[in-house]
Amino acid sequence: MKHDIEVTINGTPTAVQVESRQLLVYMLREQLGLTGTHVGCDSSNCGACTVLLDGEAVKSCTVLAASIGGASIVTVEGLGTSEELSAVQEGFRHCHGLQCGYCTPGMLMAATSLLLDTPDPEPLAIREALEGNLCRCTGYQMIVESVQWAAENGGAGPVATAEREGASS
Amino acid sequence: VQGGVVQGIAQALLEEVVYDDQGQPLTSTLVDYCVPSAVDMPDMETHHLEIRTTGNSLGAKGLGEAGATAAPQAVVNAVIDAVGHLGIRTLDMPLTNLKLWRALNPDLQETS
């Protein structure tokens, strides 16, 4: 069965037709072409598919697209631009918080959500917030340092902050 | 290096591919096969000690994943050191809670 839903994707109102069983991550990747959101395990363990749903980090492989009509989604494409990265993105670049990069979109979204909740997190709080995002390459140390850098240099950023405020109003 | 260290620590403590007697894989998802998350792993610092080889004119040596090869024995030796006074001389990786508990309580039978 098909459902017509309207969602806001990275600030743009978008009408999409989705199947009942369709997951948000496949709506983003296959219908909207937003392939920055990755599919890792497809079972909500690895966190590569993390996006912001009404300002909260969720694993988009565990969200039915048909259930989110009216919601606002931010994917990694919406955090910043190539010319103007968000502080979290810049932190990962500056502190070398990635190697292969597969987990990075999810890490960026989870870290952004953390900084909305906790603007100045301790390293352990960063590790706890990223518990649902697996990384095989880095050993996490430089990811933690990247998020610390972001906290000290701009925080979650305007896009995510507006998203959280929009959801609460 | 740091990623290798984490892989090595995880090999010592968490990760194991398990099959049952019929060859059915029991660790086929990331829930059953325990890849470490950030909170499972410690903060670490990396220091380099550079010693040039005299075996070639550049002084360079080939090296890969030194952390992954060094970390397991460091962790396991630390655990053996901690429980050695109880007569435990060897434990097989990964040193899961259950495996360590069994080693520490050899007289207790599991009931299920």
Image (tube, coloured by chain):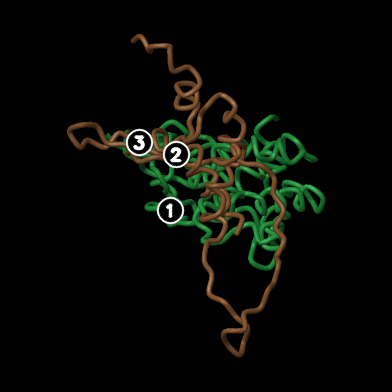
Q: Which residue is mark 3?
A: A3
- Residue B91 location (% of width, % of height): 46, 35
Q: How many marks?
A: 3
Q: Amino acid at mark 2?
A: Met
- Badge 1 marks a residue whose secondary structure is loop
Category of crowding for the residue at label 2, using alpha-carbon neighbours closer than 10 angstroms: few (below 14), some (14–19), many (at least 20): some
Quarter holding the C terminus of chain B? top left
Q: Earlier in the sequence, mark 3 or mark 1?
A: 3
> Could you say which quadrant of the image residue B49 lies in?
bottom right
Q: Nearer the viewer, mark 2 or mark 3?
A: 2
Q: Which residue is mark 1?
A: A32
Judging from the image, mark 1 belongs to the subunit labelled A
State the residue lying farthest toward the top.
B111
> Could you say which quadrant of the image residue B53 lies in?
bottom right
Residue at x 64% of width, y 57% of height? A97
Q: Which residue is mark 2?
A: B93
Asked if the residue under mark 1 is in contact with the one under mark 3, i.e. CB atoms within 8 Å, the reply is no
Side (left or right) of A139 relative to B103: right
